[in-house]
């Protein structure tokens, strides 16, 4: 079996972690805007199968940025 020869070819088009992070930051309006956030807010709903927690979305505000 020759797995070693096939591995580099399959990774040729793979993105690096730095590229993925940079793309994510750009999709969120850029690093400067992310750093300007003082109170991050997360809104979520829990819906699993037929169970739904609460009747509406729940919002959490974090005291400090998480980055």
Image (tube, rainbow, N blue to C red):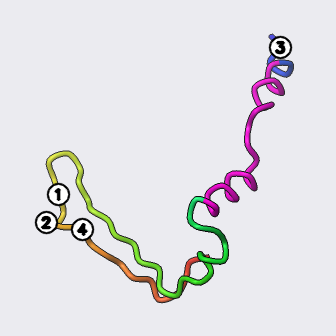
Mark 1 vs mark 4: give the one in front.
4
- Residue 64 pos. (x, y %): 52, 87
The answer to whether mark 3 and mark 1 are in CB contact below 8 A is no
- Range of residues picked out in magenta: 6-26
Q: Secondary structure at mark 2?
A: strand
The answer to whether mark 3 and mark 4 are in CB contact below 8 A is no
Mark 1 vs mark 2: give the one in front.
2
Judging by the rendered image, the residue that carries numbered circle 2 is 55
C-alpha span from label 1 to label 4: 10 Å
- Residue 15 pos. (x, y %): 73, 43
Which quadrant would residue 37 be assigned to in this image?
bottom right
Query: Relative to 41, is 29 on the left or the right?
Result: right
State which tag comes first along the sequence, 3 or 4: 3
> In the image, what residue occupies the spot 80% across and 19% down?
6
Judging by the rendered image, the residue that carries numbered circle 3 is 2
Judging by the rendered image, the residue that carries numbered circle 1 is 52
C-alpha span from label 3 to label 1: 50 Å
Q: Mainly helix, strand or loop, the magenta region?
A: helix
Which quadrant would residue 65 be assigned to in this image?
bottom right
- Residue 49 pos. (x, y %): 20, 45
Q: Is residue 23 above or below residue 58?
A: above
Figure quadrant of the C terminus: bottom right
Q: Is residue 50 magenta?
A: no
């Amino acid at each position: 079996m020759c797995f070693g020869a096939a591995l580099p070819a399959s990774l040729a088009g793979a993105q690096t972690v730095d590229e993925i992070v940079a793309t994510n930051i750009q999709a969120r309006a850029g690093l400067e805007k992310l750093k300007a956030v003082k109170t991050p807010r997360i809104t979520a709903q829990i819906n699993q199968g037929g169970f739904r927690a609460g009747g509406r979305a729940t919002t959490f505000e974090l005291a400090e940025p998480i980055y």
